[in-house]
Image: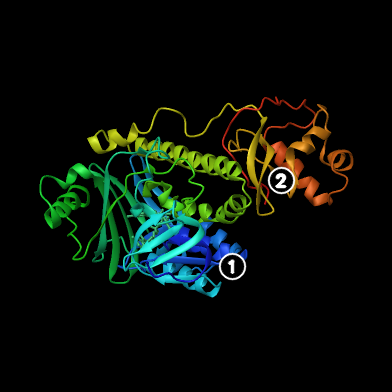
Amino acid sequence: MAPQIGTFDIAIAGGGPAGSVAAVLLARAGFRVVLATLPPRAARYEGMSARVAAILARHHLPLAGIGPAAQRHVSWGAFQGGQNSEHLADRSEFDAGLLKAAQGAGVRVVFASVSSVRPDAGEIRLADGTCLTARLLFEARGRRAPRQSTELNRAELAGPDTISVAGFVPPQAGDMTTPRIAARPGGWVWSVPVDRDRLWLQAVGAASSLGQSSGKAAVAALWSAVAGETPLPRRSVVHAISPRLAAPDLDPRCPRLGDAAVALDPLSGHGMFWAVSSALMAVPVARALFAGEADLARDFYRNRVAETFWRQARVGRDFYREAGFQTPFWQQRAAWPDEAPAHETDIRPHTAMQVVVQDGFLARREVLITRDAPGGAAFAAGQEIVPLLRRLNGQPLPDAERFHSAVLPEAPPQAAQAIHQWLLSQGFTEGAQIPWDTANRETEPCNYDPTA
Ligand SMILES: Cc1cc2nc3c(=O)[nH]c(=O)nc-3n(C[C@H](O)[C@H](O)[C@H](O)COP(=O)(O)OP(=O)(O)OC[C@H]3O[C@@H](n4cnc5c(N)ncnc54)[C@H](O)[C@@H]3O)c2cc1C
């Protein structure tokens, strides 16, 4: 019989941001958790948005290896200039910090290679034959997670084959103070100063740029097709980075998190946000599955991954279009995944039943869907929105004072005002009849409080 380690409620394969944040939160929620992962390896740098840093801080999670925010210089077709800011993230340090936090929260972290995740047997098998058994498994091995079994994976969707080659290059004139992203005919480059003497440069091109050769020659071919004269780094890190919806449906014995569920084009800058926000769903999903409410978990998961994939794929497509190049690299990516708009602009406010997170548990609730909250909003300033609107009984939205006294007298004035303000921002004009229909259309979910 295979040797086993301990007794656990939950076993997680993979300790990137998705796996380790989920492990911390599950342990804090009282579950006995084991996590098996390979330790962070070679140097690797990414850009982290302020939103990710804020979520981590809110959950008292460490921000090891995260630098201060710096404005990014963008050279993208007609657009040349400063846009958005990002934090330089040293992924080795960042991942190590989260794994340490997991250990601190009581998670048993096993540094080992996972050879298989077996939902049917409730076990994760390590390369040395050791088994980690648990009532529930989570798959968080990122893009290295194997494809889901065909019966669950009816519709894996993948974008054009794209490769990233990155590494340290010597300083270049004018490039040593800010992160820069630039569109080139053969792909795009992102560079960021790491210290006075080194720039981290990432060149992204089509897999076809690798040419007929293999190994280092193929990498060099892609690099020169995108980065031009800049010499190939002595040690380059190569990743396949095609966007893909890897697991559209939930396996109730082994939910997937982060890139193992939906892997995004790094151009979106949304990968870490998704990894961390998907980890936030681990606790409510685990609670639902342990309580025998797999249907809630299934609906919640399906909506979250579909919303993330389609929205980000279309946002990415529009960004590729903006570069204005007509080379095959750009044409292919400007046409994928479809022609639908990234943001619906003609959504009439309406309600729908969705699965949301309420006080750490999944629940089916009515949500309000508007143009600015196409994913639906269940709560505003801690109040359930739809029952509140029902109190208006089809009457026009009153002014803020009357809204407080007539609709929400039990709430503190600031909360009533915040909700009133939010309703106005969603197109509920003061004094006008509320233009909503209550058709229960099936749409994407949302469990966030837009005023929080
Ligand atoms: C080149 C590149 C650039 C990117 N740039 C950005 C960016 O600028 N901004 C951004 O937000 N996102 C970026 N991303 C996306 C971001 O890196 C991912 O979305 C994020 O890391 C996903 O987190 P995860 O935990 O799901 O997976 P990962 O971070 O991939 O973590 C998976 C973990 O599983 C472990 N693992 C895998 N296989 C095994 C195994 N067999 N046994 C044991 N352990 C295993 C790995 O060691 C790793 O620790 C980029 C991605 C790439 C590839």
Which quarter of the image is occupied by the N terminus?
Answer: bottom left
Q: Amino acid at mark 2?
A: Ala
Report crowding for label 1: few under 14, some 14 to 19, many 20 or more residues within 10 A (C-alpha). few
Q: Amino acid at mark 1?
A: His
Marks 2/1: CA distance? 23 Å
Is residue 165 left or right of 54 when viewed as pictured? left
Rendered residue at 57%/62% (across/down): 26
Q: Say above or below: 361 vs 156.
A: below
Rendered residue at 32%/36% (across/down): 333
Determine whether the residue tagged by mark 1 lies in a helix, strand or loop: loop
Question: What percent of the width, then of the height, locates residue 269?
Answer: 42, 51
Reading the image, the residue beneath label 1 is 60
Question: What percent of the width, then of the height, locates residue 328?
Answer: 23, 35
Determine whether the residue tagged by mark 2 lies in a helix, strand or loop: strand
Is residue 238 left or right of 449 when viewed as pictured? left
Colour setting: rainbow
From this viewpoint, is residue 100 visible? yes
From this viewpoint, is residue 49 visible? no
Q: Say above or below: 9 vs 320.
A: below
Report crowding for label 2: few under 14, some 14 to 19, many 20 or more residues within 10 A (C-alpha). many
**Where is ligand 1, by quadrant?**
bottom left
Q: Which mark is residue 167?
A: none
Reading the image, the residue beneath label 2 is 380
Pick whichever, 299 or 414, lies toward us.
299
Question: What percent of the width, then of the height, locates residue 208?
Answer: 19, 42
Can you tell which quarter of the image residue 57 is in? bottom right
Counting residues from the start of the chain, the first of labels 2 and 1 encountered is 1
Question: What percent of the width, then of the height, locates residue 308?
Answer: 48, 42
